Image (cartoon, rainbow, N blue to C red):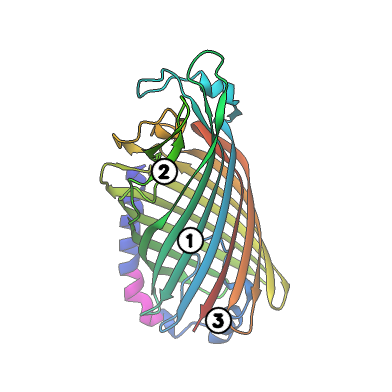
Amino acid sequence: MRKINLTWLLLTVSTFIFTNSMEDMGHDMHDHEMHNHSKHSAKMHGPIGLMGDHFHRKGESMVSIRYMKMTMDQNYIGSHKISDQDILQLPNPYGMPEKLTVVPQDMNMDMIMLGAMYAPTNFITLMTMATFNFKSMDLKTYQPMMERNVVGDFTTKSSDLSRFNFSALFKIYDKVESKFHAQLGFERNMGKSDLTGRVLMPMGGFGSLVLPYGMQGSDKSSSILSALTYTRTYDEWKFGGQIKSKINAKSYEWNFGDSNELNFWVQKDLTKISAWSLRLKYQDIESIEGLNKDIKAPVQTANPLNYGGQTLNLGIGINIMLPKGSIGLEAYKPISQDLKGPQMAMNWGLQAGYHLSF
């Protein structure tokens, strides 16, 4: 996997050098009239859930705000649902009690993302984004022995500035009907990795513990981002594909696993100011690497091996042009999930956003 991403890096750098040398030759041949037409099309931007799907011309800027909500429920191992009783039979890797006693029931995650793009030249667009996370998880605590009766329910919450990233998009090919660009970037996870919460203990009563990995603000790691994006337009239709990856470059004690992602989407004009979209997103995420020795609760989310997996989501969205800027909305559901469990599966997700270019 790391060899694949290294190849992307080399391809991007060599392509950038070639494109830079050809920029002056190709720039004058660009069709400005058609560019201005596509610039004001609702499908100028891809589905709102995509990042880095387009580049800008020299001197153009864009600011954006996005909101994302994702809900999770029902525990899985691989692609199979499992019950609370199944989970209670699993061993606790941290000693006593011998088996797991706390079972997640559902989780809500809300994100606010603030972004900006600026093109200092016709073939480089700079992009940055800051993400704020708000998480809430409902859990059920069971007795550690005997009949394993329910002790009670409780909720843990956390919020933090999660991460900040900075990328450069390099134009490889730019025609009216087709565009191709590469992305290289850096992401820094800035949130706290030792957040604590009030937890209902197996013997009754509440205590304060370091929250499991999925409820932390971040993993304090730094990662390399890379992507390749291609779009093709046929009259009122637009098709696109994107392959992207995130590779951990430096970690503190632990880090979320490397990820690879594939996106394929189609868009079609509805009116002069709106376009609908259909998107398939495949994601492969590795398990957590490393360990926080203070995370030892008898719950599946305290085990770094119970993270990651493969998911395929289907999203339906709409983009609408406004007198100033544009808005986008996309809802998505998983088609299939193969999770490194036990862990909760995604139920549905929603993303909305506003772009303003100038």
Q: Kindly report the distance in space between the C-alpha atoms of the residues bearing marks 1 and 2.
A: 41 Å
Which residue is painted at 61% across and 72% down in the image? 327
Q: Kindly report the distance in space between the C-alpha atoms of the residues bearing marks 1 and 3.
A: 19 Å
Say what secondary structure mark 1 lies in.
strand
* The quarter of the displayed image where residue 59 is located: bottom left
Question: For residue 229, which numbered disc appears in the image?
Answer: 1
Question: For residue 35, which numbered disc appears in the image?
Answer: 3
Question: For residue 197, which numbered disc appears in the image?
Answer: 2
Q: Do the residues labelled 1 and 2 touch (CB within 8 Å)?
A: no
Q: Kindly report the distance in space between the C-alpha atoms of the residues bearing marks 2 and 3.
A: 53 Å
Is residue 351 toward the left or the right of residue 197 in the image?
right
Which residue is painted at 32% across and 75% down in the image? 21
Say what secondary structure mark 3 lies in.
helix
Main secondary-structure element of the magenta-colored stretch: helix
Residue at the extreme top of the image, as rendered: 146
Q: Is residue 6 magenta?
A: no
Q: Earlier in the sequence, mark 2 or mark 3?
A: 3
Query: Can you give x and y, in whole percent of width and height, for residue 150 in the image?
Result: 57, 25
Query: Can you give x and y, in whole percent of width and height, for residue 310 in the image?
Result: 51, 39
The amino acid sitting under disc 2 is Gly
